[in-house]
Amino acid sequence: MAVGNAAVQRRRQHAVSVAKERREATFRAKRLRREGVSLDMDVESDGGMVIEEEPSVLDAQMGSAVEELKLAVSFKGNDEVQKKVNALRELRRLLSRSEFPFVEIALKRGVIPLLGECLKYGSEDEQLLEAAWCLTNIAAGKPEETKALLPTLPLLIAHLEKSSLSVAEQCAWALGNVAAEGEELKDLLISQGALRPLGRMMLSDNGSTVRTAAWALSNLLKGQDPEAATKLLNIDGVVDAILRHLKKSDIELATEVAWVVVHLSMGSDVATSVLLMQTNLVQVLVDRLAVSSSLQSLIPLLRSLGNLMAGDAYTTNVVLVPGHEITDSIIRSLSKCLKSEHRFLKKEAAWVLSNIAAGSVAHKQLICKSEAVSLLLQLLTAAPFDIKKEVAYVLGNLCVAPADGSGRPNLLLDHLVAFVRNGCLRGFIALVRSPDLEAARLGLHFIELVLSGMPNGEGPKLVDEADGIEAIERFQFHENDDLRMMSNMLVDCYFGETYGLDE
């Protein structure tokens, strides 16, 4: 199997790692709201205010706060609302301090039914906001603490559409924390109807509201759920809202919306088709990529573009036409990312380039004429292993043309010769020696191109001089059938009994 075919087959697999690698990109799945902190200013749940009181004092404070809320909920009189607001405010203040297990104490004291009571329809906005804020911070805790919110989910969802913007936004924040807990709660929220009102919140022109809704939707869509992705895009106005917000100058807003695009394009071919063929989304993403400089904004832009190109050949062949400014722009931007100090950006940029390099011969030639190739060759030698592997896919794709009628890709000899002359062979041989079988297979495929394709039959000598024979022979008795067969074929065809006799 040729390098190009291998690259095409694994493009989709790359999208599966979004949840894990988003954490590498400094994005938190759950967000605690502190005093005076908006969603885009969230902080890690293991930092914050320093608490100097003794644990017994803090335990007593939370116990007292829950008891005060019980009294306030049961009180009937002229100032009953203010009593509840005051009690909720004190409870929320304690729940915003993550260094002591206030949530655990509050749950043991029976706080969830009380908060559910305070979320009932017809309550004052201030009361609803404080109750939703408390639930938000409870949901930011441990899995069992998040699951404690189950009785309140229908009310939180209902307030998304039936309450003021500030209350709806806080409820969306709470639901985003719940969705972040995993598949079970995410599926429950979707079954209870959370997707539609969160999607409709994207239509707002209020930046804070859209950021919160987009973040919650990202958690709700995380994974590969084609049905949920399609449902979201079928909500009137959502697609246009996504494009509108991506074009805004608000970097935090555009970043959160870009993550929605990441998850939409990851699991649904239908959603990808809508985004590609009915909008100018790729152009918007490329334009945003060209002017972005922060790690947090570049990552979802790169991932979105990579996902869209991994779905099918439409993006590469129809949207990214060689000679058009959009194509030149994305290659320039990807080259910029390859020069970044951030490992993740280099890896993502190489992945996107591998998808472009899997396109037509004209696409391959365009990349080869850019500064990207010299950067890729440097990375193959000196970058961390995971980046080397992505880079190897790009270089391998650049050396083969799309398959003809026979099903085998055609060798692009000038590209192969240029890469080998610039020292890339040792980088591929190093992949063969790695314990990663996918990387080893990739290395063996490239060695096969060198052995069979280099002019004047010099391939075997080049591989030998780079200590490649020993690397190939590692797999002659390997348990993996494909690698074992490939290894023996290469040794028998190019390094048999007659090898070296001519010299």
Image (cartoon, rainbow, N blue to C red):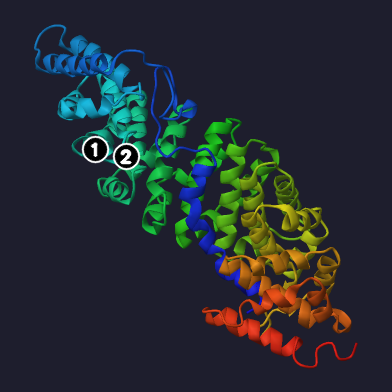
**Residue visible at 55% across and 41% down in the picture:** 25
Circle 2: residue type: Val
The residue labelled by disc 2 is 178
Q: Position of residue 121 (x, y in %)?
A: 19, 27
Mark 1 crowdedness (10 Å alpha carbons): few <14, some 14-19, many ≥20:
many
Q: Position of residue 222 (x, y in %)?
A: 42, 49
Asked if marks 1 and 2 touch (Cβ < 8 Å), the reply is yes
- The label shown at residue 153 is 1
Q: Pick out the residue farthest to the top.
A: 78
Q: Give the Cα separation between the discs numbered 1 and 2.
A: 9 Å
- SS assignment at label 2: helix
Residue type (three-letter) at the residue carrying disc 1: Leu
Mark 2: few/some/many CA within 10 Å (<14, 14-19, 20+) = many
Q: Nearer the viewer, residue 325 or 147?
A: 147
Choose between 46 and 43: the one closer to the eye.
Answer: 46
Note whether residue 438 is visible: yes
Residue lying at the far right of the rendered structure: 503
Which numbered disc flags the more N-terminal residue, 1 or 2? Answer: 1
Q: Quadrant of the C terminus?
A: bottom right
The one nearer the camera, 169 or 355, is 355
- Residue 313 image-quadrant placement: bottom right
Where does residue 153 sit, x and y in percent of width and height? 24, 38
Does 450 appear above or below 324? Answer: below
Image quarter where the N terminus lies is bottom right
Q: How many marks?
A: 2
In the displayed structure, 53 sits above or below 288; it is above
